[in-house]
Image: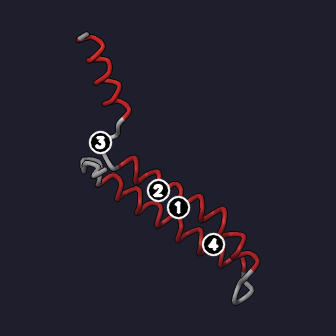
Amino acid sequence: MIRIFLILVLFLIHCSEFSREGQIREECEKTRNNSYIFMLPILERHTTNGNTELNSAVWITNTELSYKKCISESEKNRYNLRSN
């Protein structure tokens, strides 16, 4: 009985993620992927000045900078516990 209880507790600890770091990293990855999937084709088709290469390069640079900032925020939240 004790052995089953211990295995169950270890399984629950392993499955639950106490830190918010993983949750924030998943959101960062999803935002970055959506940016590349949806926004780049729009920028290539609809530009205000006709310079699609420059607009795409600026968008990619901004996306990567925001991704790095998001990852650093997730690392800061490594020891903050989840509220849910």
Q: Is residue 74 above or below residue 19?
A: below
Within 10 angstroms of label 1, few (less than 14), some, or many (20 or more) residues? some
Q: Amino acid at mark 4?
A: Ala
Instruction: Select label 3 or label 1 by which is in front.
Output: 3
Q: Is residue 29 above or below residue 36?
A: above
Q: Is residue 55 above or below residue 60?
A: below
Residue name at image x 39 percent, y 46 percent: 22
Q: Amino acid at mark 3?
A: Phe
Report how far apart the C-alphas of labels 3 and 2 lie in the structure: 16 Å
Q: Which mark is residue 27?
A: 2
Which residue, as the protein is rendered here, is positioned at the far bottom? 49
Query: Residue 4: x percent and y percent?
Result: 30, 13
Q: Which residue is mark 4?
A: 57
Q: Which residue is mark 1?
A: 31
Upstream in sequence: badge 2 or badge 4: 2
Would you say 48 lies left or right of 69 here?
A: right
Residue name at image x 69 percent, y 76 percent: 43
Residue name at image x 27 percent, y 11 percent: 3
Would you say 40 lies left or right of 78 here?
A: right
Question: Where the N terminus falls, by quadrant?
Answer: top left
Within 10 angstroms of label 2, few (less than 14), some, or many (20 or more) residues? some
Q: Which residue is mark 3?
A: 18
Query: Residue 9: x percent and y percent?
Result: 28, 24
Dot 4 falls on a residue whose secondary structure is: helix
Report how far apart the C-alphas of labels 3 and 4 lie in the structure: 38 Å
